[in-house]
């Protein structure tokens, strides 16, 4: 037991941030306050309206027949028995869908070397992963649809499957899509500086192999959609659990040949997403297509098995990383080889390349590294297509580099925290472009490190660790310096020719009573973005928070990108601020006319129009609104009361924003059982100005736990035939409350330059760094044993194998099957 | 395939007496959601793992996806809607809101009902014990800490209020 008590987690009870007043807003404004979300009580009272909760007149239900195999050809489909089943309205095949719907195929104008296959919403000839839809049964109830789906007889010709990404790239591998001629979806090499020379001259060279298992988003609400088509108006109304309703509006219009202004997509309450509800799925396009075929509302809700068999999975990487350092611990070069498996299709329309591209180019960006090389090969394989998951590629690059730094620090006998400090980009070096090409405006690496060392009482913890090792207790401490790319601008998807906007709009108006309605182009799956928008609007307009109602998630409303890439407040917040400023000016124009004064002399404070000079009350805000709506005859004819305003924002001066921070993990390994117990976790985050510290800290904690889950529990396991063995929540383990530690949070503030609000974004920070911190902590704990692990998740089996307690299974190299090698270390 | 076998049952849901003829294979949570429109109980896994469908049956927290509707014959069911309207868990809900112990809200009905079971007979508990108690309910959003904080706070409040015999 600890011979001394360190400060571990001691400040957990303290508020993480003493609400730093935002310079753009007056004292007493709600900006910077940890106010509760107005919608939270509704959700906590069972009054949420998730997609599956809704029912429409004449609505029918879908059940999909999905492929039981990972690779097969469809010789024929017999639907007669299913069609005769009571309650069945129709049985739809891929050929039926093709009469009203175009297929999906990823093309990236700026990366033409990315090859992809055509994907039908319901497969017509061949399937490329287990779970791909091959028919849909439409019935009056889901139960009848499921019963009848059992009766659809598919004549299959099973084809050889390939699941291992390295095997998929080897000569002679079965082809996932014979039309492509290769399983190589994409490859790229990024090189900057004299890498080989740096390695040759290094005092220390470390190498490690990394096996990042594929993981799943596992939003608790599975994907769901209700599509309602009215043939008399050729209009489609879709209610969908989705992160980006405007994207879906465009997609439904394009694929179904409808006019875009007659398609409306509403994402109401969404029960978690994490990236999985960002894409266009065949079963969802098929649902809308079937609504067009039938002219009545159609509902599809994925069950959990379907979610595992169809929701985008992510982050399947095999990597070898090398790092060269001089004897002072300065990093001379990194060289990383990445192979990623993206499943049966490149996911539509974004592609599945984001994970690999971000992993390969973000490597080591926080550090001043002279030479950089990464090689990326992306393979098709007969698995569920991969896509976005909180952090997209960044947890991979972070884990690789942080682990390599720890190994180099160990080799050079330098403290890991000190090694990081020696290599950070320095304050004078910003703005900086990393060797991988990442543009960083201003980071706060050293202040974050200083703060976390103090927070965790680092020196004491190290001392305690070494004392406990003497007693046979094996604890590990791991750091992860992380960057978080947030709020990408048009450069991310524009050059690819994709209809994905990086710009959000805000439409705002005063109601006649003086309260405010605001529509915003981001969306909110519980992050609390809409609350932050309300805080910004209320503070800008000088009205109470309760006087502002914010809505989002309706493609007929304010245009925007939705929720992804930690963009909500950084982009929509700017748009809302600009719109609210314009609205304020419009209102004061009316007030000035009524008062026969100048608008510059007036202000709005707490629902009142006051003189700027002395705060004297002149008129109530409500009275100005009444005049503007009902008594225009009181105004001079040249004054048109415009009590609404619209504004748009997307980053223009920077391609995206880069937030940063550091995490530390403290854990204990039981060398007999292989069990890992998380003891503490700390994070110091710099996301720029914080609008709502309560919600920001909840984003950090939730993100961290998702990253801890990947490191310790989660992995989508497939057998050699491509059968997914972890397709229930009893098999795919996600963190529960008991395994998770309390998390201590602190903040450093570096406002984003070039914006009015200085917000950077925070949604992915926790996930990006948490996994890496566990990698480093586990291998730190194992150091006295002279072994290290390289395979996620760090299950007892992985730990005990590394410790030699259980035998190492022979690993056959899929490329050279005659070369047997040991466990990845 | 045979026509679906049905049975007639009577039960109480949130204090209202109900008679219904239901398919014998129907799960309780489907009956609540589809037949009664009580959509506050959610389906997360349909395997009894995630806890999103948790309801009370004769005062005991039960997985609505593991119980058949016909098994509720003669029983007293309470859902999040009933518990909200009666005010029985108002203090817990208020703490969840104040501490942002929910994000997307999909797990929250079940989480509240599970937590409420722990609060019924309040006794001093460590954070670890609270975490153990909540470990049948899965939340992907919050990381659990705010939930534990909320439960601990209500627990302390109820102990202080001498609500031990409630």
Image: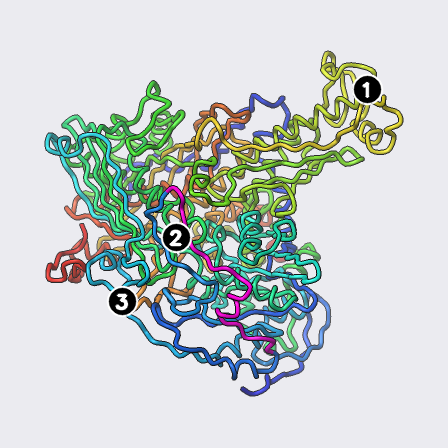
Can you identify the residue that label 1 sits on? A593
Q: Nearer the viewer, residue A469 or A530?
A: A530
Residue depicted at x 34% and y 76% = A157
Cα separation between marks 2 and 3: 31 Å
Horizontal and vertical percent position of residue A53? 62, 61
* Tag in front: 1 or 2: 1
Can you identify the residue that label 3 sits on? A720
Q: Nearer the viewer, residue A182 or B119?
A: A182
Residue depicted at x 50% and y 63% = A283
* Tag in front: 2 or 3: 3
What label does residue A739 carry, if any?
A: 2
Residue depicted at x 21% and y 57% = A800
Check contact, mark 2 vs mark 3: CB within 8 A: no
Looking at marks 3 and 1 on the same chain, the residue that comes earlier in the sequence is marked by: 1
Cα separation between marks 1 and 2: 63 Å
Element type where label 3 sits in the image: loop
Horizontal and vertical percent position of residue A180? 31, 58
Q: Which residues are magenta?
A: A88-110
Is residue A101 covered in magenta?
yes
């Amino acid at each position: 037991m600890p011979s001394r008590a360190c400060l571990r987690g001691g400040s957990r009870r303290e508020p993480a941030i003493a609400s730093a007043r935002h310079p753009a807003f007056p004292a007493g404004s709600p900006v910077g306050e940890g106010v509760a979300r107005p919608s939270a009580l509704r959700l906590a009272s069972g009054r949420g309206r998730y997609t599956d909760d809704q029912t429409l007149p004449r609505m029918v239900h879908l059940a999909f027949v999905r492929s039981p195999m990972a690779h097969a050809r469809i010789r024929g489909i017999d639907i007669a028995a299913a069609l005769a089943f009571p309650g069945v309205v129709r049985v739809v095949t891929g050929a039926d869908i093709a009469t009203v719907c175009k297929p999906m195929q990823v093309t990236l104008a700026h990366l033409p070397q990315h090859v992809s296959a055509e994907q039908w919403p319901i497969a017509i000839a061949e399937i490329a992963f287990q779970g791909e839809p091959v028919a849909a049964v439409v019935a009056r109830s889901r139960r009848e649809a499921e019963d009848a789906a059992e009766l659809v007889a598919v004549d299959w010709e099973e084809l050889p499957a390939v699941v291992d990404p390295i095997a998929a790239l080897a000569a002679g591998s079965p082809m996932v899509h014979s039309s492509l001629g290769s399983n190589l979806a994409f490859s790229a090499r990024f090189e900057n500086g004299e890498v080989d020379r740096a390695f040759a001259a290094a005092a220390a060279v470390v190498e490690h192999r990394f096996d990042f298992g594929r993981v799943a988003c596992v939003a608790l609400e599975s994907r769901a959609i209700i599509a309602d088509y009215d043939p008399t108006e050729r209009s489609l109304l879709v209610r969908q659990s989705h992160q980006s309703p405007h994207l879906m509006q465009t997609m439904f219009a394009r694929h179904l040949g409808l006019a875009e202004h007659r398609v409306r997509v509403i994402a109401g309450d969404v029960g978690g997403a994490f990236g999985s509800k960002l894409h266009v799925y065949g079963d969802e396009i098929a649902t809308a297509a079937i609504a067009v075929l039938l002219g009545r509302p159609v509902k599809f809700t994925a069950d959990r098995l379907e979610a595992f068999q169809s929701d985008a999975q992510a982050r399947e990487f095999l990597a070898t990383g090398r790092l060269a350092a001089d004897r002072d611990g300065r990093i001379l070069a990194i060289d990383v080889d990445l192979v990623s498996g993206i499943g049966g299709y490149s996911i539509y329309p974004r592609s599945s390349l984001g994970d690999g591209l971000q992993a390969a180019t973000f490597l080591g960006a926080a550090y001043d590294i002279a030479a950089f090389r990464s090689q990326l090969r992306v393979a098709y394989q007969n698995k569920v297509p991969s896509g976005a998951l909180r952090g997209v590629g960044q947890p991979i690059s972070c884990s690789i580099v942080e682990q390599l730094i720890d190994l180099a620090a160990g080799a050079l006998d330098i403290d890991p925290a000190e090694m990081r400090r020696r290599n950070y980009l320095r304050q004078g070096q910003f703005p900086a472009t990393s060797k991988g090409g990442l543009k960083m405006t201003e980071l706060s690496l050293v202040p974050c490190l200083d703060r976390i060392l103090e927070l965790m009482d680092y020196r004491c913890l190290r001392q305690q660790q070494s004392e406990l090792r003497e007693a046979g207790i094996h604890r590990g401490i791991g750091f992860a310096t992380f960057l978080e790319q947030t709020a990408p601008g048009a450069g991310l998807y524009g050059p690819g020719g994709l209809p994905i906007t990086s710009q959000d709009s805000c439409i705002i108006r005063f109601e006649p009573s003086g309260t405010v309605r605001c529509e915003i182009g981001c969306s909110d799956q519980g992050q609390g973005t809409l609350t932050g928008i309300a805080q910004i609007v209320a503070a800008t307009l000088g009205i109470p928070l309760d006087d502002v109602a914010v809505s989002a998630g309706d493609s007929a409303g304010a245009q925007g990108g939705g929720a992804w890439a930690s963009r909500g407040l950084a982009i929509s917040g700017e748009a809302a601020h600009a719109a609210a400023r314009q609205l304020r000016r419009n209102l004061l124009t009316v007030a000035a006319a009524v008062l026969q004064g100048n608008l510059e002399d007036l202000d709005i404070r707490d629902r009142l129009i006051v003189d700027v000079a002395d705060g004297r009350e002149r008129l109530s805000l409500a009275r100005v609104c009444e005049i503007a709506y009902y008594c225009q005859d009181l105004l001079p004819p040249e004054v048109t009361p415009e009590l609404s305003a619209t504004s748009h924002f997307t980053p223009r001066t920077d391609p995206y924003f880069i937030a940063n921070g550091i995490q530390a993990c403290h854990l204990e390994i039981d060398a007999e059982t292989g069990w890992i117990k998380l003891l503490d976790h700390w994070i110091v985050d710099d996301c720029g100005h914080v609008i709502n510290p309560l919600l920001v800290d909840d984003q950090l904690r939730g993100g961290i736990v998702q990253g801890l889950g990947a490191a310790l529990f989660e992995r989508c396991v497939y057998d050699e035939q491509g059968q997914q063995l972890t397709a229930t929540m009893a098999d795919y383990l996600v963190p529960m409350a008991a395994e998770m530690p309390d998390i201590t949070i602190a903040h450093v503030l570096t406002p984003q330059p070039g914006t009015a609000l200085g917000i950077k974004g925070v949604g992915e920070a926790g996930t990006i760094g948490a996994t890496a911190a566990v990698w480093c902590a586990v291998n730190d704990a194992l150091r006295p044993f002279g072994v290290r692990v390289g395979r996620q998740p760090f299950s007892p089996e992985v730990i005990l194998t590394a410790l030699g307690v259980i035998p190492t299974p022979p690993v056959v190299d899929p490329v050279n099957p005659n070369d047997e090698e040991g466990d990845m270390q | 395939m045979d026509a679906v076998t049905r049975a007639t049952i009577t039960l109480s849901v949130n204090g209202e007496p109900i008679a219904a003829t239901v398919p014998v294979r129907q799960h309780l949570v489907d009956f609540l959601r589809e037949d009664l429109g009580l959509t506050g109980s959610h389906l997360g896994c349909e395997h009894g793992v995630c806890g999103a469908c948790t309801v009370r049956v004769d005062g005991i927290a039960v997985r609505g996806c593991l119980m058949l509707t016909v098994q509720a014959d003669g029983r007293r069911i309470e859902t999040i809607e009933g518990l909200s309207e009666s005010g029985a868990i108002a203090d817990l809900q208020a703490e969840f809101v104040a501490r942002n112990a929910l994000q997307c809200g999909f797990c929250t009905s079940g989480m509240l009902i599970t937590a409420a079971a722990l609060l019924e007979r309040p006794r001093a508990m460590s954070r670890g014990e609270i975490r153990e108690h909540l470990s049948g309910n899965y939340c992907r959003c919050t990381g659990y800490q705010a939930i534990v904080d909320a439960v601990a706070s209500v627990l302390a409040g109820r102990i202080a209020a001498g609500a031990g015999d409630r």
